[in-house]
Image: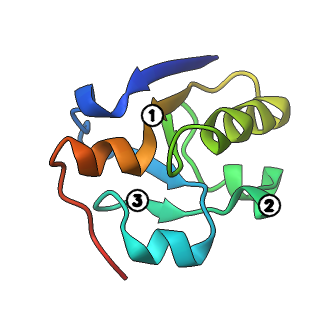
Amino acid sequence: MIRKQEITTFDRPEGAIIWDVRDSKSFAEGHLPGAVNQPIDHIDAQQLQDVPTGTPLYILCGGGSKAPRAAELLEGFDDSREYVVLMGGTRAAKAAGIDLEQG
């Protein structure tokens, strides 16, 4: 199941797994604390095996176009999981004053 949530209303649950699907350069320029860089071009079913079953997978990108595509790709690998697209991405997070990490 894919659902959407505005990044500006995201209150990170404890233990949340967040995949930032931008390229590594964009990720290094600023990302949500604790996010893992999983570029959309390199996502495969094997990476999904590292996410515990029953744990929602939060997905975001820079502005909101890659994350929905990544969620659809992941749902194709395993449609029993919950995928949450964080709409607006890191640009909206930054504009809303949400702290981003660099590196």
In the rendered image, residue 56, in percent from the top left (x then y), is placed at 48, 32
Q: Residues within 10 Å of mark 1 (few under 14, many from 20)?
A: many
- Taking the spot 18% from the left edge, 58% from the top edge, the residue there is 99
Query: Which residue is labeled 1 in the image?
Result: 86
Is 12 on the left or on the right of 47, as rendered?
left
Q: Reading the chain from its start, which is encountered first: label 1 or label 3? A: 3
Question: Label 2: which residue?
Answer: 41
Does the residue at mark 2 contact the one at mark 1 (Cβ under 8 Å)?
no
**Do tag 1 and tag 3 residues touch (Cβ < 8 Å)?**
no
- Left or right side of 24 for 15: left
Lower position in the chain sequence, tag 2 or tag 1: 2
Q: Amino acid at mark 3?
A: Ala
Q: Residues within 10 Å of mark 3 (few under 14, many from 20)?
A: some
Q: Residue at x 24, y 26 (%)?
A: 9
Q: Quadrant of the C terminus?
A: bottom left
Image height of 31 relative to 10, above or below: below
x, y percent for residue 46: 78, 57
Report the amino acid beneath label 2.
Asp
Secondary-structure class at tag 1: strand
Q: Nearer the viewer, mark 2 or mark 3?
A: 2
Which disc is residue 35 wearing? 3
Q: Secondary structure at mark 2?
A: helix
